[in-house]
Amino acid sequence: MSDAKGRADAYKAAGVDIEAGNAFVGRIKDMVKSTFTPGVVTEIGGFGGLFRPDLTGMEEPLLVSGADGVGTKLKLAFLFDKHDTVGIDLVAMSVNDVLVQGAAPLFFLDYFATGRLTSGVPEAVVSGVAEGCRQSQCALLGGETAEMPGFYPDGEYDLSGFCVGMVDRSRLVDGKTVRPGDAVVGLASSGIHSNGYSLVRKLFDQSGLRGDDAFPGGEKSVAETLLEPTRIYTRSVLHLLDKVQVNGMVHVTGGGFYDNIPRVLPEDVAVQVEFGSWPMLPVFDWLRKQGELSWPEMLQIFNCSVGYVVITPEPDAALEVLAQHGQPAHVIGEVVERGDLEEQVEIRFPR
């Protein structure tokens, strides 16, 4: 008769260490608990996470869900052996999407998959996930750690995440009320965020730079600059929604300005963006020069220092509220009648 340890020997010989997985869960329990909000009514380790939403004051609560990953930015995390920021990226990509419709994030679930659990790396990743949840004021309610030998190269892993938020229908922000005359307010990004990294990696490889080099024109290293985590806009935007009329919001992700802004616009309006009306981070100037790209190409691929957009008839009040919460922002354009414009986003470049 096999003892408890012996029962797992055959699976361990095939490459899956159940004991290591259980030990990992034990090591991250405190990280996970640090994210718990009053709605959490379960402990880590169950088959499903339990959450009791606070419906006080809500007439018709709506759940808003989102799912995303970090993409090939992970390749740079592997290369630079820096794993404590990509978890923040993972949370940010989903919670910022949920936030666009005015929803406050309730809870987050993560999925971590690797060929072999190695000490230190999974903990670093989860520490970033927990930090992202704390920043976005949502609970890390559960997740999955999958050890799949032979499926991933040694030292590599993949991440995906899932967020659920809630908004009262009367406060839903869906873009339907966007109208000519509204101002377009751009909220500063922290850097590249988590999109365009197939091109970023190509340009980095061509540059001859190393991770510990000083980034050209910046104050951080190359590794720190390229792995700068995605900014989470939850706190500043939720406060903004309490103070200012907001008709539409945009999370600037893959597809840049040209593809994301139209997603919240009625068919009969367009947005004119005044290029140069906001400061540009050095990393985007470097990418443009290194890749010999035009600014229209850059704005199709990257956030170009604007990670989130708020469309509002009250721009001065919006800027004041955002400043109170430490969020740099600028009026970058306006909503106009579409007329004969073929595209719904027109970038106006200085002559």
Image: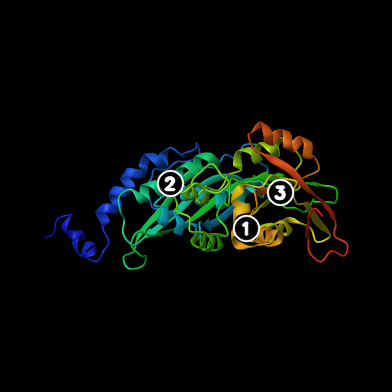
Which badge, 3 or 1, comes first in the chain's sequence? 3
Q: What residue is rendered at 40% in x and 55% in y?
A: 144
Q: What residue is rendered at 45% in x and 59% in y?
A: 75
Q: Residue furthest toward the left?
A: 1
Image disc number at residue 29: none
- The correct choice, above or below, for 215 with respect to 54 in the image is below
- Residue pointed to by mark 1: 289
Q: Position of residue 182 (x, y in %)?
A: 82, 47
Looking at numbered disc 3 in the image, what kind of residue is underneath it?
A: Val
Tag in front: 3 or 1: 1
Label 3 secondary element? loop
Q: Image quadrant for the N terminus?
A: bottom left
Which badge, 2 or 3, comes first in the chain's sequence? 2
Q: Image quadrant for the C terminus?
A: bottom right
Looking at numbered disc 2 in the image, what kind of residue is underneath it?
A: Asp
Image disc number at residue 173: 3
Q: Position of residue 224 (x, y in %)?
A: 49, 47
In three-dimensional space, the C-alpha distance between marks 3 and 1, rounded to whole angstroms, equals 37 Å
